[in-house]
Image (cartoon, rainbow, N blue to C red):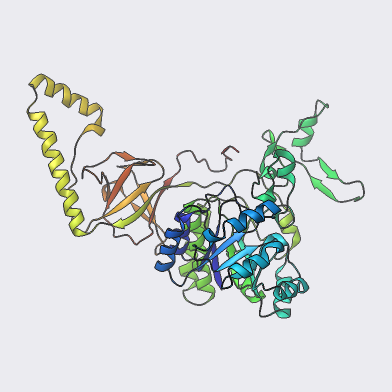
Amino acid sequence: MELLSPAGNVEKLAYAYAYGADAAYIGLKKFSLRIKADNFYEDEYKKVIALKEKYPEKRLHCALNISFHDEEIDALKANLDYFRQYPIDAFIVQDLGIVPLLQKEFPKAQLHLSTQASCVNSEAVKMYKSLGFSRVVLGREISLDQIKRIKDSVPDMELEAFCHGAMCIAYAGRCLMSAYLTGRSAQSGFCSHSCRWEFKVHGNASDAKTVAESGALVLEEQQRKGEYFPVYEGDDFTAVLSSKDLCMVEHIADMKAAGVDSLKIEGRMKSVYYVAMVTRAYRKAIDAVEGKISQKEADAFIAELENVSHRESTTGFYYNKADADKTTSGASDSKYQLTAELENEYTADSLDALWQKGQTAYKVFKDNLDSMHPAAREARLKDLQIHTDRNVVPFEKKDGWKMYDCTAVNMLRAGEEIEYVSPDFVSLKALPDEWELINPETGTKLNWACDSHPCAIYSKYELPAGTLVRNLDPDYEDGKIRDFGR
């Protein structure tokens, strides 16, 4: 069973592969339903090629899943030479108008039918097979029993199904709510997620809000007597059509038994941390189902899904349609935040060279202090007590410690407890005296680093490639829904 992970940019693609994805799906600028994801452009194909060379067994799928207008087909034709530079194994499409073009220009690439095509029956699967498709990404409205029937009817067609991530209340995501409210069409990749906005209830009646908060307010369509849609006002907002997140991590054996060939994780607009942690959890869960590791070994990784940004979860339509009908409110949230990404380990020679830089910087600093007039020196020392960032403190070599290039993505402060997560281990706490933050240009200690600040981490622990650093989000409050803006 294949694990397919989202990759909104090159960085996320690297982590998807490193954390266990068999394949990843990307979008190219202007031709993907996640237009707000970074997507891929300019010369990034060179980095993608390098990743494919590093992971030769991994596959790359490209989403061309918008509904094409004529001018967009013209743009697609104009960009064919650019597309050819990417090592694409398969195209994910919903618009049949571009199929002959892709078959002609990319004869070695497979065609995968997008979930946007809402394929949920065996006759449709047979038809798409006759058109040259090798895989169908099934509509999310399908059940496991229906999947099994399709697989039994068309056993040589690969079936892909979503296993995790945000769901859309509209049929196969074909929603007009965003276009109606904001002019941003979901079918062109501009969905504003209007269904998850928080609406206040207004009305002429003085008790409208009180009635809404009571939970007694429901909608009933004129021609559908007895079918009720609840409307609930809470804390000055009402959630409209906001679906729960899909989570099938405990039901992978059932999906495999039904005939699913590829498990797909939603989230090209999600963070590096999300991609890494969710991919890792499903990798371990699949490995346990396939007997490669024990379920006990997998459980600790699976439990970490609770530490990734998410809403309430559901099994969607797979078992019971009523499960998918239950809505939720609030933004996706997590108690952890990604603090930094660790990269290359320093060699012994590079560590020695940086240590020497630190010793030199400290000597210059100390010589300058010693050469000052006593009164000026005293004033300088008092200033350094107040502004400790101005101190020059070289790091000292420690037996067994390793140094890694580090990219800070949130505030990283020396002297705090941090956690490492990696493809190989669940998590590892590093106490304040078990790591140091180093300036990679001077070899001196740093008190803090944040986004765009070059830094290195000197660690007591030997850490595998792809290790991430996280810490508790200081603004997170358990049970409180935060407003992240729109």
Depth check, front residue: 184 or 250: 184
Depth check, front residue: 187 or 153: 187
Residue 136, horizontal then vertical, whole percent: 67, 69
**Does residue 464 appear in the picture of this structure?**
yes
- What residue is at 31 percent from the left and 49 percent from the top? 431
**Does residue 6 appear in the picture of this structure?**
no
Depth check, front residue: 18 or 294: 18
Residue 348, horizontal then vertical, whole percent: 19, 59
> In the rendered image of this protein, does residue 105 appear above or below residue 27?
below
Q: Which image quarter is the C terminus in?
A: top right
Q: Which image quarter is the N terminus in?
A: bottom right
Q: Is residue 376 left or right of residue 154?
A: left
Total numbered labels: 0
Q: Is residue 219 left or right of residue 338?
A: right
Residue 230, horizontal then vertical, whole percent: 78, 45
Residue reaching furthest top?
375
